[in-house]
Amino acid sequence: MRNASIWTAAVVGAMAATALGPAGEASAAPRTLVVATNGNDSAAGTLAQPLRTIQKAVDLAVPGDVIAVRGGTYALTDNITITHSGTASQPITLGAYQGERVVVDGEQLPASHTPVGGSIPRAERGAVHQEASYWRISDLEIVNGPYGIYCDGCNGNVFARLKTHDNYESGFQLQGASGNNQILDLDSYGNRDPRKNGESADGLAVKEGSGTGNVVRGARLWNNVDDGFDAWKFGSPITIENTVAYGNGFNRWNFPDFAGDGNGFKLGGGSPAPAVGHTVRNSVAFKNAAHGFTDNGNPGTLALSRNSTWANAGTGFDADVSGGKATLTANLAVADARAAAVGSGTSASGNSWNLGGTWNAAAVLSTDPAPLTGARAADGSLPQAPSFLVPRSGASIGARF
């Protein structure tokens, strides 16, 4: 079963297991709780009598239940707060009903309009604020929130096929004691933070915490004000695969005293930065305002293999921290301001800059990202881009999509 099919399988299984029962009624079998914009929170929560708010369904759901949200825009006046957990064998599922477009809009939330220099109270962070484990959340579009999704102390969750864009902080932030989460096929773009003049709104941040087993796969992170991906002060290894970061760190909002960093993938940081061995493979960073991939002071055993960079304003692969132990293997850097900055402790072999020659646009089959940045496949997977940044020489280096 493909990752993007998790939601469909969960809904079909739950609806086959039981008839739709009244919301809140104890049930030996999983229930499906239906939410619709024309529903009523005093209703039964069935397809014929749906609930009105996602929050009501969240409050009623118990392990094994499915929350099916009908299409439409859900304008929040208070954020959706998830504080109770499913179980490993019976997660709680939240997603769009049969592929309908569901938009969760946080524009009316007071924290979305925190003034310059202000701080967002912890409980108000996120149009969706989660402090819970064993949820399956998918197929939602989350916009204009004070963060899109903010998850703190979250374990064993699957987040699939989400869109988090135009939020007033990071599109998706995972932090605290959080492990074994899967973030799959995320599109996160256009996120910005006026209150910090662009200092911290990333596409995806896994930061300021620890927890093993976190995986990012198939994400696209673009045109965010700070970084595409940020692992600032996260103390446990993260695996990133088949992920794209581009166009980050530019002041598209005309913020004064602009402070956006503009890295595609920021793989650490802090004072001091924890030594962490993140893994990144088959991923690409292009046209970012700073570096494509950077250790950002992380002296850990980073492992970067078969990744590509193109036309970044800084260094394609920046792994020059003193005492760092990164391993860079079979990566490709094309037309960045500098291909690589490699420290004395870094092992680099089989990369384009090791092979020699001129690595410019003429050295690859295509520098047109349109196939990769276009519509996803029906199952949520990345579109195919078989020529993008593929060496004309046939060298087995760089990412393939």
Image (spheres, rainbow, N blue to C red):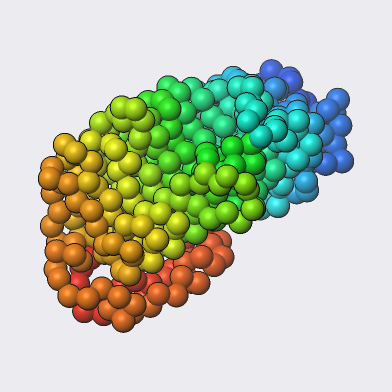
Q: Residue 137: x and y, percent?
A: 57, 38
Q: Residue 129: x and y, percent?
A: 62, 28
Q: Look at the picture and state if 127 lies above or below 87.
A: below
Q: Nearer the viewer, residue 214 or 346?
A: 346
- Horizontally, is 89 left or right of 54 in the view? left
Which residue: 14% across, 64% down?
A: 354
- Horizontally, is 214 left or right of 185 in the view? left
- Horizontally, is 22 left or right of 250 in the view? right
Q: Is residue 78 visible?
A: yes
Q: Is residue 104 visible?
A: no
Which residue: 78% across, 48% down?
A: 72
Which residue: 70% across, 43% down?
A: 144
Q: Residue 343: x and y, percent?
A: 17, 46
Q: How many marks?
A: 0
Q: Residue 210: x and y, percent?
A: 37, 26
Q: Residue 124's quadrant in the figure? A: top right
Q: Look at the picture and state if 6 lies above or below 335.
A: above
Which residue: 52% across, 39% down?
A: 200
Q: Residue 114's quadrant in the figure? A: top right
Q: Residue 363's quadrant in the figure? A: bottom left
Q: Look at the picture and state if 311 lies above or below 54.
A: below
Q: Nearer the viewer, residue 149 or 344?
A: 344
- Horizontally, is 264 left or right of 120 in the view? left
Q: Nearer the viewer, residue 7 or 122?
A: 122
Quadrant in the picture for the C terminus: bottom left
